[in-house]
Amino acid sequence: MAEAKKETTAKAAKTETRAGAKAEAKTGPKATIQIQYFRSVIQAPVKHKRVVKGLGFTRLNQIVVREDTPSIRGMVKTVPHLVRIVG
């Protein structure tokens, strides 16, 4: 009885992973944006420093490429005086 349950669970897991892979393949390429960190976070509030770090910046004048999602757009909107969208 326990062996039969394990087999059906394993089969279900395999079909789920195949379906997930097919779904990702159908979505196509994701839209991206380039963001530049152009002004220092010195004297900026701690929340702004965390947002800049969360966007993946480590150096001034650095440009990173991120997916164009509402969450990333919201982060950029939070610190428009520190970062800008270049492309």
Image: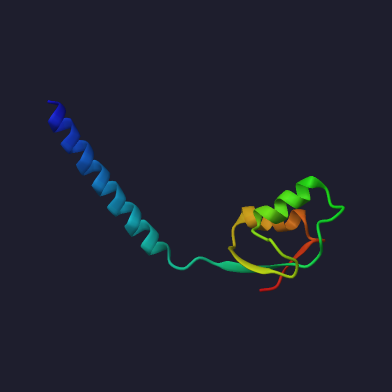
- The percent coordinates of residue 30 (x first, y second) are 50, 65
- Residue, x 37% and y 63% (percent of image)? 25
**Residue 83 against residue 5 in the figure, above or below:** below
Residue situated furthest right in the rendering: 43
Q: How many marks?
A: 0
- The percent coordinates of residue 15 (x first, y second) are 25, 48
Give the side of residue 6 with respect to residue 37, left or right.
Answer: left
Q: How is the image coloured?
A: rainbow
Give the side of residue 1 with respect to residue 77, left or right.
Answer: left
- Residue, x 67% and y 58% (percent of image)? 73
**Residue 39 against residue 52 in the figure, above or below:** below
Residue situated furthest top in the rendering: 1
- Residue, x 28% and y 53% (percent of image)? 18
**Splitting the image into 4 quarters, where does residue 31 fall?**
bottom right
- Residue, x 22% and y 37% (percent of image)? 9
- The percent coordinates of residue 86 (x first, y second) are 70, 73
Quadrant that contains the N terminus: top left
| 2 and 32: which is toward the camera | 2
Quadrant that contains the C terminus: bottom right
- The percent coordinates of residue 66 (x first, y second) are 59, 63
**Splitting the image into 4 quarters, where does residue 11 fall?**
top left
Residue situated furthest bottom in the rendering: 87
**Residue 81 against residue 49 in the figure, above or below:** below
